[in-house]
Image (cartoon, rainbow, N blue to C red):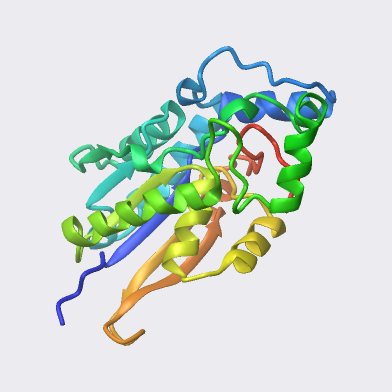
Amino acid sequence: MEQKWPHTLWVVRHGQSAGNVAREEAEAARLATIDIATRDVDVPLSALGERQADALGHWFGELPEGERPDAVLCSPYVRARATARHVLDAAGLADVPLVIDERLREKEFGILDRLTTFGIREKYPELSAQRTHVGKFYFRPPGGESWCDVILRLRSFLEMVTREYRRERVLVVAHQVTVNCMRYLLERLDEAQILDIDRQADVPNCGVTSYEFDPAAGHHGKLVLRLQNFVSPLREAGAPVTVEPDVPAAPKA
């Protein structure tokens, strides 16, 4: 049977953003709201986030020529697009196509956008209690998405990948929840398994999770996990590893 998957699939979270920094400061000060003037889609990288993306790009550029990305698929959010461009520039891969796909956007927070954990409990105590009862996998804030909603759009995204990028090497640049939901689909996890992964640690900024096609796996071959939240390129370049969740912060379920 013909191989339907890419040879290699890298899934990367964007570099540290100004929103990550603002969220950490608001949580530390126990403020109700996060001081971000722009829409979530327009939040840029921090200076450290740019360094992280450059460090990751140098790592990709040092791979053997036949093992570098053939295409980059990216969230439309500014911080993700900037990460992808820094990676391509630093890797010397200016000719590699960069494709923006809205299905890779971060989970939408709806009315909870820009609220800290304290702000959610203070302003929407009933929603906070409902989320605790239902769990983040199924809880959908008004105007926002659950993890299941993100997974639904990512199913469509992966179907496109199998049609248009089979046998290629594909880099995906997205967001924390998007990375975890991709893992849920690619590794065929259940709710408990993916939430346990999420509970153990946040996805590092510019952390790499990668898969390689193994023709001997499964009935007809499949993508097999090779790297999980790999951050060695950042440490080697002296760029601090950061793991702040995207806003709004939410208690671990």
Image side of residue 91 versus residue 12, left or right: left
Q: Nearer the viewer, residue 136 or 244?
A: 136
Image side of residue 225 versus residue 251, left or right: left
In percent of the image, x 34 and y 37: which residue is there? 102
Q: Is residue 81 above or below residue 158?
A: above
Q: How many marks?
A: 0
Image side of residue 31 versus residue 74, left or right: right
Please state the horizontal and vertical placement of residue 223, each as a whole percent of the image.
Answer: 36, 72
Q: Quadrant of residue 114?
A: top right
Q: What is the quadrant of the N terminus in the image?
A: bottom left
In percent of the image, x 77 and y 35: which residue is there? 126
Q: Is residue 3 above or below residue 56?
A: below
Q: Nearer the viewer, residue 54 or 166?
A: 166
In percent of the image, x 60 and y 52: which residue is there? 138
Please state the horizontal and vertical placement of residue 222, each as a whole percent of the image.
Answer: 33, 76
In percent of the image, x 75 and y 51: which residue is there? 133
Please state the horizontal and vertical placement of residue 34, each as a whole percent of the image.
Answer: 69, 21
Image side of residue 123 versus residue 192, left or right: right
Please state the horizontal and vertical placement of residue 5, each as a whole percent of the image.
Answer: 26, 67
